[in-house]
Amino acid sequence: MTTDSAAPAAYELAQVNIARLKFPLDSPELKDFVDALDPVNAAADGADGFRWRLQSETGNATDVPVFGDEWLILNMTVWRDTNALTAFMYQGQHRELLARRHEWFERVKEAMTALWWVEAGNRPTVADAEKALLRLREQGPTPEAFTLRTTFPPPGGASV
């Protein structure tokens, strides 16, 4: 998305990803993942284009319920655009964690990541995230819920 630096963007990109744990969060098998949460969250917080992330009192969202399933963990963020999200995802420690995700999380065939546009300054809820994931699973990519492989521009916006 290109934005005029003189005018704030009307929309920002919301992102949710969920994962089904193979082991309890406090297990030795997930120690590397859990130990990396704070540094990766700090890197995200300082990344270009980062706007917001869902946090509980723990400073992350691994204890925020999603779909009523205690084995699912949630990450939800808001970014300036798809370019900012992609730049963060595939660099540094986050990239290293992505490479190891199958050690910690079950392989799931249904969509576990969804993107959608929110009005600038609005912060999505877990219910919004669940709705986006269900829409993507049922309808495939649409302007209301999509993926990085199949993106849509913000409402009334330029192509991303």
Image: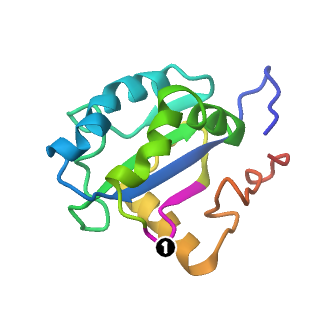
Q: Which residue lies at the image location 77% right of the left edge and 26% below the top edge? A: 7
Q: Which residues are magenta?
A: 108-115
Kind of residue indicated by mark 1: Lys
Q: Main secondary structure of the magenta part?
A: loop
Secondary element at image label 1: loop
Q: Which residue lies at the image location 41% right of the left edge and 28% below the top edge? A: 40
Q: Which residue lies at the image location 53% right of the left edge and 31% below the top edge? A: 51
Residue 125 visible in the picture: no
Relative image position of residue 129 (x, y in whole percent):
45, 58
| Rendered position, 71 above or below 63 | below
From the viewer's perspective, tell me whether residue 66 is left or right of residue 149. left
- Where, by quadrant of the figure, is residue 66 drawn? bottom left
Identify the colour scheme used: rainbow
Q: Nearer the viewer, residue 7 or 13?
A: 13
| Rendered position, 102 above or below 58 | below
Relative image position of residue 87 (x, y in whole percent):
65, 32
Q: Nearer the viewer, residue 129 or 88?
A: 88
- Residue designated by label 1: 109
- Where, by quadrant of the figure, is residue 1 drawn? top right
| Rendered position, 129 above or below 36 | below
- The crowding category of the residue bearing disc 1, from other C-alpha atoms within 10 Å (few below 14, some 14 to 19, many at least 20), is few
- Magenta span includes 119: no
